[in-house]
Structure formats: structure tokens, C-alpha cells
Image: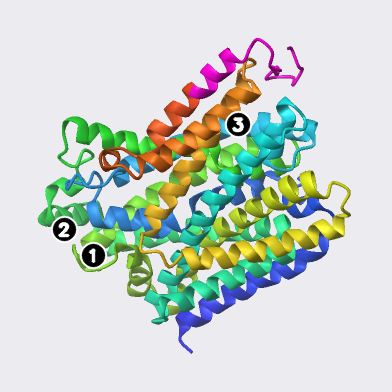
Amino acid sequence: MSAVAIGFIVYLLVILVVGIMTAHLNKSLPDYLLAGRRLGPWVVAFSERASGESGWMILGLTGLAYASGLGDPTGTRLQPAFWTGIGGVTGVISAWLLVARRLREESERLGALTLPRFLELRFRGQDTTIRFVATGIIAFCFTFYIAAQFDAAGKSLQQTFGWAHLAGVMVGAAIIVFYTIMGGFFAVAWTDFFQGWIMIMTLVLLPLVTLFHLGGVEGLSEKIRAIDPQLLSLGGGRSGWTLIAGILGGFGVGIGYLGQPHLMARYMSIRSKEDVKVARGIAIVWSFFSYGGAVLMGLVALAYFGGGYFDDPERMMPELAVTIFPAWFAGILISGALAAMMSTADSQLLVTTSSVSEDVYHASLHPEAEQKHLLLVSRIVTLIIGLFAIALSQLPQSIFDKVLFAWGGLGAAFGPTLVLTLWWRGTTRNGVLAGMLTGFLTVVIWDNIPWGSHLYSLVPGFLLAGTATVVGSLLDRGGAQKVQATTGEQVG
């Protein structure tokens, strides 16, 4: 057995042990879905960041930077690597400042375990329409998102061990589904904590050591400029609308952080509102290192291997690791790619499970069900969703494209409505419903029209959803219930 395989297997065993050890901590549905709201700031911060970045960063963004440099001189990418990194960090900061603390306070006050249930309780208390619409959007988008993470597992194992892509998908999916079923949110959060450290180590060490091999920044610049000087240009030689669309696309990725249900679950699970400030600082620092490292990794790989070395740029990271480091250490770093995928897929599995088991089965079908029964239902739903995502992982789209679609749908549907719900006292139930549907449908339609390819769908989706929420709320003022953003007091 190779040293790479040994390092990889040791990592997987640690993850499985965590899932088994945390299984006994789940005595109720709140334990399974939110770890009983008793996680500390370090675990929450690393879990939120690890689950927020996924295989799209460690394979997708690094591959994007390798294929098109900082600004994409070809003008074919909706999100150039540099602007995606800037937009991502900005989005993380915005989500922690605008959403985290208020959502933690309000979700506990209302007794909400999920985002759909929070929106329902915030306005009318019992409203199956708003809950079912939110649940449907989450289940639809997350199934594609989970499929992208399974695809990342398949590519990592295929590039490293020569496995068939489907075999890699099955191995990665089986491990994730197993420890999620066993340990629930406790297992997900604690495995995310360890995976977050491996991810940041991979994203920092691998590009920096490669940069040293290249002779530092000067050597890097010299080699890339020999390929194409525009690869190091922040604008990529673009001008006019092409440049503006690229910048908007990068920042569009960032605004998506405001509406991702698996990240909202982290905010809701933190031990106390006082811990939010500590967790926020940790998460922001993590983001600077991870986004910067991902873009740098693509650039150093471009300088090291040359352009066109990989048929699929998203397989670049494992090859770079085994080339630069000893095999045993490369195995650990390659685990970082699987860690990125796992830390997001497990979170999304759990959020999708909670939307079905809590928001549909428990709230509408069996409100008197015992906790043990609800736990069993949640675990069955987790398994079914995992199997469906395995099938979708075989679609031909890249990891980056699958994630961008799901990210856009969720960010547009929930980002504007959630921020307005938490900060604007005039937000109403009908306004939120209009915003969710407008944001989601805009992304779906925009991604399927010819001229939609010139701008990332989340940008118009977010703007139109925000407008629909405000207009719908203003039209609804006559008889709808309005909620005081800071206290939750009904004022109409």
C-alpha cells in the first residue's frame, strides 16, 4: 500500500470514529439537527467556514485560477478567480455581521430548528405555504449541491488512485452518509472542525511551498508572463461590460453567503449570542487565508506545470500535492480536498433532512411523534437524499458549475428575505413569499436563456428578490402582520 493511501485511510478512520463517538449524544431532534445549541465559537466558526467552502474552492476555484489566471483574459468566465476571492471574503464578513447574531437570538426565542420554520414562526406561526415553499427550494438546490461534493470526491480519488469516477463517488458518499446518520449535527460540526484545519493547511502550505520551488514571486511572475502576461492582470485585459460583468459575478458569489441554509444552521447552533463575536473573528481570518491560498494555488500550478497540462483543471490539486510533497504528507493534503467536500455535503445532507423531517413530516404530518421516531425518520431521509445525489453527481457539468447553480438559487431565494426580515420592521409574510419565489425562479430562468450567460444569475436574482420582498411587504401593509426586527414584537 502506498504512503499516499496510508495517509488518506488514516484520515478517513478518524472521521468515522468521530461519527460513532458522537452518536450517543443525539437524544432528541434538536440534538440531531442543531447539537442542542451548545457548540462553542471555535467549533462553530470552523464548521461554518469548512461547510461554506466545499470542493468548489479546493478543486473548483483552484482549477479556475489555473485555467484562467487572476482576471481571465479569455473573457469566458462569469467569475474571474481574483474577483471571486474578493467577493467571497466580503460575503463572509457581511453574513456574520448582518445575520449571525440576530438569527441566533430570534431562532431560539421562537423555538425554530430550521430556516423554513423560523420564517413561518416569525410571521404567522402556522403557515404551511411559506414553510413548504422554503423547504422545496432547499431540497431542490441542495440535492444538486450535494451531488457536486460527491463529484469532487470522485475526481480526487480518480486522480490520486486511478479509481473509476463512480467508485470514488460511492466511497466518499458512503462515508459521509454513514457518519451523518450516526452522529447528526454533533458529528457534522466536530468533523468540520478537523476538516477545516486540514483544508486551511492544504490551501496555505501547498501554494507557499510550490512558490518557494518556483523561486518566489519573481519566479512565478516570470513563468506566467511567458505564457500570457494578461493572466496576472486583475482585469484580464477585459474592458467595458465584460469587465463589469466579471467583477459583479465575483461579488455575486459573495452575496450568496447571506442566504445559505447550511450556514444559517451554524449561527443557530452556537452556544450563546456572546460567542458570536469570537466566532466571527475566527471565520473572517480563515476566509482571508483560504481564498488567498486557493487563488495562489492555481497560479503556482500554472507556473509549475504550464498551461494546458490538465484536461480537467479541477484535477490539478491532487497532482500538485503528490509532485511537491512526500507521498505520506501528500495523502494528508489530498484529504483536504475530500475534507472540503465532506464538510459541505454532510451539512447540506443534514439541512435537507431537517427540512423534510422537521418542516414537513413533524410539523404537518405527525406533530405528536416521539423523539426516537423522528430521529429514525431523519436518518432514513438522509439515506434517500444521499442516494439521489449520487445519481446526480454523474451529470456532465463541472463541480464549479453545479455549485454556482445551487448557490445562486439559495442565495437569491433566502439572502434578501432573511436580511430584510431581521433588519426591517416592515417585512411581511407575503413580501417574504414573493421574494423567495422571485429569487429562485430568476436564477432558474436566467441560467436557461442565451443572454443569461453574460452575468451570474445570482446578481439579478438577488436584486429582484430584494425588490419583490420590499414591494410585496409595502402592498401587504394594510392587513398583514408585521414584526419588529429587534424584539420580535408584532406591531400590526
Label located before the other in sequence (2 or 1): 2
C-alpha span from label 2 to label 1: 8 Å
Tag shown at residue 316: none
Q: Is residue 246 found left or right of 480 in the rendered image?
A: left
Task: Name the residue at the top extreme.
Answer: 478
Rendered location of residue 114, percent (x, y): 70, 42
Q: Is residue 130 above or below residue 167?
A: above
Mark 3 is surrounded, within 10 Å at the Cα level, by few (under 14), some (14 to 19) or many (20 or more) other residues, namely: many
Which one is nearer the viewer's eye here, 242 or 59? 242
Measure the alpha-carbon separation of dots 3 and 2. 43 Å
Q: Which residues are magenta?
A: 468-492
Q: Residue at x 19, y 65 (%)?
A: 308
Name the quadrant containing residue 125: top right
- On screen, 134 above or below 485? below
- The kind of residue on which mark 3 rests is Val
Image location (x, y in percent) of residue 245: 27, 35
Q: Characterize the local packing of mark 2: few (<14), some (14-19) or many (20 or more) Cα atoms within 10 angstroms.
A: some
Name the residue carrying label 2. Answer: 223
The one nearer the camera, 390 or 312, is 390
**In the image, residue 51 lies at what x, y percent?**
56, 52
> Viewer-nearest of labels 3 and 2?
3
Horizontal relation, residue 370 to residue 301: left or right? right
Q: Earlier in the sequence, mark 3 or mark 2?
A: 3
- The residue that appears at 55% across and 48% down in the rendered structure is 49
